[in-house]
Image (cartoon, rainbow, N blue to C red):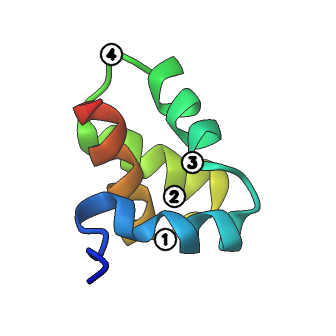
């Protein structure tokens, strides 16, 4: 049996397809804005890059956990 991807990474294929950039691109943007609070980073992705809340939240959660 194949194990399904869980957590923030489950969003990655749709993020890459919708926004045309690899996850590493978004993680680098988030890391460049440090130090910042989680929601500040989510708001940045939404306002500056037109990202939806769920996708932005998943990327920030992943980047801050890494």
Say whether marks 1 and 2 touch (CB < 8 Å).
yes
Q: Which is nearer the N-term, disc 2 or disc 3?
A: 3
Q: What element carries label 1?
A: loop
Give percent across and percent down for residue 29: 57, 31
**What residue sits 55% from the left and 69% below the top?**
13
Q: How crowded is mark 4: few (under 14 residues within 10 Å), some or many (20 or more)?
A: few
**What residue sits 27% from the left and 46% below the top?**
61
Decide which of 25, 39 is in the foreground and name it: 25
Decide which of 62, 42 is in the foreground and name it: 62
Q: Which is nearer the N-term, disc 4 or disc 3?
A: 3
Q: Which is nearer the N-term, disc 3 or disc 1?
A: 3
Residue on which the image places disc 3: 23
Residues under labels 1 and 4: Cα distance?
22 Å
Say left or right for 3 vs 48. Answer: left
Q: Which is nearer the N-term, disc 1 or disc 2?
A: 2
Residues under labels 3 and 1: Cα distance?
15 Å
Q: What element carries label 3?
A: helix
Say left or right for 54 vs 17. Answer: left
- Tell us which disc is closer to us: 2 or 3: 3
Q: Which is nearer the N-term, disc 4 or disc 2?
A: 4
Q: Residue 52 carries which label?
A: 1
Q: Residues within 10 Å of mark 1 (few under 14, many from 20)?
A: some
Q: How crowded is mark 2: few (under 14 residues within 10 Å), some or many (20 or more)?
A: some
Residue on which the image places disc 2: 46
Q: Residue 29 carries which label?
A: none
Indicate the quadrant where residue 50 lies. Answer: bottom right
Q: Vertically, is 37 above or below 34?
A: below
Give percent across and percent down for residue 58: 34, 58
Residue on which the image places disc 4: 35
């Amino acid at each position: 049996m194949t194990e399904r991807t869980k957590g923030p990474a489950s969003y990655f294929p749709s993020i890459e397809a919708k926004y045309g950039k690899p996850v590493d691109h978004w993680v680098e943007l988030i890391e460049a804005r440090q130090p910042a609070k989680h929601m500040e980073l989510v708001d940045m992705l939404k306002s500056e890059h037109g990202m939806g809340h769920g996708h932005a939240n998943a990327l920030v959660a992943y980047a801050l956990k890494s």
